[in-house]
Image (cartoon, helix red, strand yellow):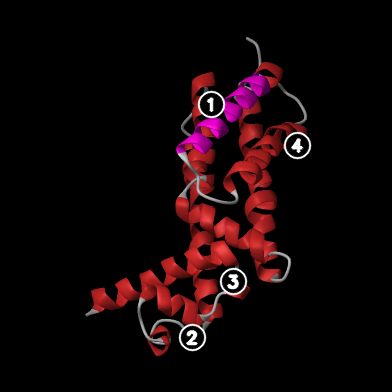
């Protein structure tokens, strides 16, 4: 019984995210969600107080995921005293392939993009996720890379902006709308690899 209840709750969240990422939170009703889940409208209120409650649970779940990643990475950083080009490239590619292309995370960011012009909460979270927190986290990593002698002792803020601007370009051009096909994945990774190689050619410290 408990398992069935949890399954229904998770299904409501999954369907809600699917619909919110396609049409936006404001354009989706409880009736729409129930129709896709295959339950009566009254059944939703056994799991959530309102549509806003569904939105809040999705946001909280995503925020937990968002902060777990840099914390885990920070722990691993403390164990490393040197970095190879291939390792740097791998981590850069993983951020795009395993994070920005992650189905759940990608849909969540799409929802925020749609809602940011009319929903203050969505706008704040969108800017935190793709800009404020992302840039702050990368600054810490780049300072560490300078400190261990992998990158040149240059303006870290400008390095971060120069690298991350292309990542944001790739996300909004290829990943923020529509299905992420194998062709899109390949094109994104080709462009990303060229960008990383050019970045290393400019900022990699020469022994």
Q: Secondary structure at mark 4?
A: helix
Residue 193 belongs to the span the image colors magenta: yes
Lower position in the chain sequence, tag 2 or tag 4: 2
Label 3 – label 2 distance at C-alpha: 16 Å
Which mark, by number, is residue 157?
A: 4
Q: Which residue is mark 1?
A: 89
Q: Report crowding for label 3: few under 14, some 14 to 19, many 20 or more residues within 10 A (C-alpha).
A: many
Vertical placement of 200 versus 102: above or below?
A: above
Label 3 – label 1 distance at C-alpha: 36 Å
Q: Quadrant of the C terminus?
A: top right
Magenta stretch, main secondary structure class: helix
Lower position in the chain sequence, tag 3 or tag 1: 3
Residue 107 point in image, percent of width and height: 52, 57
Q: Count the marks: how many?
A: 4
Eye-nearest disc, 3 or 1? 3
Lower position in the chain sequence, tag 4 or tag 1: 1
Residue 104 versus residue 183: which sits nearer the camera?
183
Residue 34 versus residue 66: which sits nearer the camera?
34
Vertical placement of 179 versus 36: above or below?
A: above
Q: Are marks 3 and 1 in contact (CB under 8 Å)?
A: no
Q: Does 206 sit left or right of 8 as displayed?
A: right
Eye-nearest disc, 4 or 1? 1
Outermost residue, left side: 1
Q: Name the residue rendered at 60%, 42% in the picture.
A: 174
């Amino acid at each position: 019984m408990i398992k069935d209840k949890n399954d229904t709750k998770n299904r409501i969240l999954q369907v809600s995210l699917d619909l919110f990422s396609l049409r936006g939170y404001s354009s989706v009703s409880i009736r729409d969600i129930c129709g896709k889940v295959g339950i009566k409208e009254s059944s939703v209120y056994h799991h959530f107080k309102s549509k806003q409650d569904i939105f809040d649970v999705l946001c909280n779940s995503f925020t937990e995921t968002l902060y777990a990643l840099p914390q885990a990475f920070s722990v691993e950083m403390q164990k490393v005293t040197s970095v190879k080009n291939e390792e740097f490239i791998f981590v850069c590619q993983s951020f795009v392939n395993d994070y920005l292309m992650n189905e759940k995370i990608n849909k969540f960011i799409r929802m925020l993009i749609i809602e940011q012009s009319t929903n203050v909460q969505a706008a704040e979270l969108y800017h935190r996720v793709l800009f404020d927190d992302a840039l702050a986290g990368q600054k810490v990593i780049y300072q560490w890379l300078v400190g261990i002698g992998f990158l040149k002792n240059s303006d870290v803020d400008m390095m971060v902006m120069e690298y991350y601007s292309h990542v944001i370009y790739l996300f909004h051009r290829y990943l923020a709308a529509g299905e992420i096909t194998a062709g899109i994945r390949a094109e994104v990774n080709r462009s990303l690899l060229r960008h990383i190689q050019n970045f290393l050619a400019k900022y990699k410290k020469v022994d």
